[in-house]
Each structure stands twice: as structure tokens, then as C-alpha cells.
Image (spheres, rainbow, N blue to C red):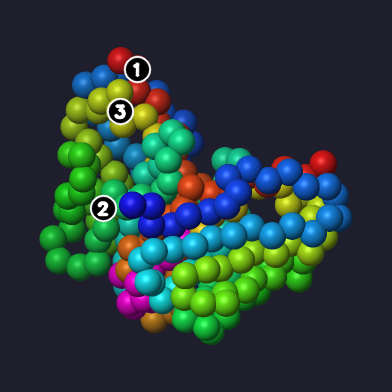
Amino acid sequence: DAMVIQNPRYQVTQFGKPVTLSCSQTLNHNVMYWYQQKSSQAPKLLFHYYDKDFNNEADTPDNFQSRRPNTSFCFLDIRSPGLGDAAMYLCATSRDRGQGRETQYFGPGTRLLVL
Amino acid sequence: AQSVSQHNHHVILSEAASLELGCNYSYGGTVNLFWYVQYPGQHLQLLLKYFSGDPLVKGIKGFEAEFIKSKFSFNLRKPSVQWSDTAEYFCAVVASGGSYIPTFGRGTSLIVHP
């Protein structure tokens, strides 16, 4: 009965080698989010999709891209990972934006290691 | 832009002790407030939330939080913690009238000794 699934749970990549993280949801939620979380820091929103409408945070590096081919799936592409991109990447969903009252449902995260 | 401060980064308690985790935010307007919890090896999940009405809100597993508007605070409390409460706790704030996207605090790691 997993609701937000992230694959893989652990990803090791080489410096500069493109990597894709995936997220899927069985909740049929409109909104999907990608967060980056480094040790002892707050989750940092990278971008979110409201249905097909892509919303990029102003300080998200160009190195990070996202795709949402359908309601259920969302991908995070890191075009040229640097050592500073090593982090936990969290995917979350919410039914709607709901004037800020919606609960977010999180996946287990993908821990990215850059060698 | 709003910010969220969680003052206690690491808290260690014995079972049956009382718990209070601080959360302060910087935003002068109407806010929606959340506490999320992440148990070891599990995903973040909602503990409780507050939008309006009674400023004392109750959540799952005996947790409660109190919204004090004048102090810009939304502290999490539990009268008697259990070993199973060992987890990371995150406060999140959504400012009304903006993008409706939550801003998270950096989290508080709670360890409860049996």
C-alpha cells in the first residue's frame, strides 16, 4: 500500500555523470514536489508541479531539471552532479495546493552519493 | 520570505519525561502550521496541523501543539514520551496568500532512552 515510491533508495554516481531519480505515486494527487535535504538542514524545495504546470524555485541551480510525463510519475534529472549535490532527495505529493492547508505525503527518499 | 526556526537540534530524554520542541516562524500574516515526523528508516509523515480556531491542536500518538500568535510560535508537546517517539521532528509553515508552498525548519532529532 505504498503511496509515494522513490527509486532507487540509494544512488551512487560519478562527478559529472548525469543521473535520474524517479518518483511515483498511487494517490492521484495533483501536486508533486522535489526537495533536497542535506545533513542537519531543512528540506529545500527545488521545484514542484501543479498538474503539468512546472514551478521552479528561484535558487534552484540549472543543473537540476524535472519531468512529469503523467500524473503518477515525476523525475529529477541532475545533468552534471557535483560533490555538493550529494544529499537526500525527497519526493512529496499533495492533493492540491489548497490555500496552503494540504498535507504533504512523502516518499522514503533517495540518498545520492557523488564520487 | 518566511523562515522557520527550530531551536532544539538534538534532544535526549528518558521515557516518561515531558517533551516540548520549539518552532518559531517569521511572517506577519496568516499562516498554516504543520509538524511532521520521520521515524528511523521511514518517510516523513504528518503529526498534526493547525489552520484556525482553537490554538491547541491535538495530533496522533498523544502529541499536541499550541499556536501562540503573539510569539510567532507553534511548539510541539507531549506529556510523557515513549521509546518509540525516537525520531526527527520537522516544523513547517505555509504563508497564506503566497505560493502555498511549505517552508520547513531544519528539524529536531529526539532520542528517548528506555
Percent x, y of residue B34: 33, 57
Question: Which label lies toward us, 1 or 3?
Answer: 3
Residue at label 2?
Answer: B48
Q: Splitting the image into 4 quarters, where does residue B30 fall?
A: bottom left
Extent of the magenta region: A92-101
In the displayed structure image, the side of residue A67 where residue A29 appears, left or right: left
Residue at mark 3: chain:
B
Asked if the residue under mark 1 is in contact with the one under mark 2, i.e. CB atoms within 8 Å, the reply is: no
- The amino acid pointed to by label 2 is Leu
Residue in the foreground of this view, choosing between B34 and A8? A8
Is the Cβ of the residue at disc 1 closer than 8 Å to that at disc 3? no
Mark 2: few/some/many CA within 10 Å (<14, 14-19, 20+): many
The image shows residue A10, relative to residue B111, as above or below, that is: below
Q: Amino acid at mark 1?
A: His
The chain carrying label 1 is: B
Q: Which mark is residue B84?
A: 3
Query: Whole-Å distance between the Cαs marked 3 and 2?
Result: 17 Å
Across and down, in percent, residue B114 comes to 30, 15
Mark 2: secondary structure:
strand
Q: Is tag 2's residue or tag 1's residue first in the polypeptide sequence?
A: 2
Q: Pinpoint the chain carrying mark 2.
A: B
The residues tagged by marks 1 and 3 sit, at their Cα atoms, a distance apart of: 10 Å
Element under label 3?
Answer: helix
Q: Residue furthest left?
A: B54
Give residue A103's quadrant in the image: bottom left
